[in-house]
Amino acid sequence: MPIIASAKSGGSFEPVSEGVHIANCISIIDLGDQYSEKYDKTQRKVLLTWEVTDETIEIDGEEKPRVISNEYTLSLSEKANLRTHLEAWRGKNFTQEELDGFDLQNVLGKPCQLSIVHNERNGNVYANIKSIMSIPKGMPTPPVVSELAYFALDDAASLSLIDKLPQWIQDKIKKSTTYGTLVRCQSVPKGADYGPVDTDSSDLPF
């Protein structure tokens, strides 16, 4: 099922460098309904991950693109960060029809520009996405290197894919009330896998 929006890193690697990078969205993970002690409320969260096309890191002897993730509240309300970033990414405001229900799977595999800044917290330096920009018309973009991943908790079949996710993401999903409800109410299908994703582009990235 689609992840519909309406009106960090788990490792110890060096952060992605500051500046503007061309990046491809490689992962959309539904984190479920997460409780915030700071705001004393529960909200649906989603994690988007991009591969940075101009920086690599060696993992198990293999050069792979650096990645960066950003967690969003699943909302397209006027002040929502997700809406701000998506509209800047596509270079066009959402129509009212799109605001009533936009399928986030549309951005999977799509390129953009990320403005990345560093912030220090508790003696550690973290890379954070300050803003997202569209790719200028006619500008070539590197192809997607990483495997694309799409995980939607409203689809029971996604539960069988959870062990493919990084452990820190699994732990966060399992804390959600959404995950607990699915585990109690539905059996887990066996042998499910990621399906093919259409990454064809038009004048708008999505």
Image (cartoon, rainbow, N blue to C red):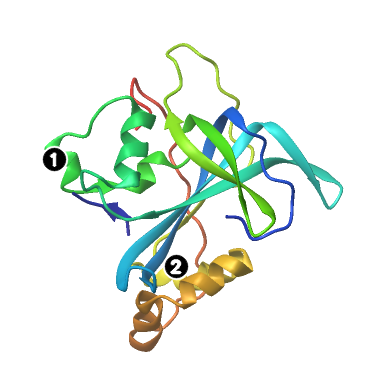
- Per the rendering, the mark at residue 26 is none
Amino acid type shown at disc 1: Glu
Q: Secondary structure at mark 1?
A: helix
According to the picture, the residue beneath numbered tag 2 turns out to be 158
Residue 152 visible? The answer is yes
Sequence-earlier tag: 2 or 1: 1
How far apart are the two marked residues, 2 and 1, measured between alpha carbons?
28 Å
- Per the rendering, the mark at residue 97 is 1
Q: Position of residue 202 (x, y in %)?
A: 35, 23
Image quarter of residue 90: top left
Residue drawn at x 46%, y 21% as measured from the top left = 135
Disc 1 crowd rating (10 Å Cα; few below 14, some 14-19, many 20+) is: few
Q: Are dots 2 and 1 in contact, CB under 8 Å?
A: no
Residue drawn at x 63%, y 33% as measured from the top left = 18
Q: Position of residue 138 (x, y in %)?
A: 46, 11
Q: Position of residue 183 (x, y in %)?
A: 41, 84
Residue 148 visible? The answer is no
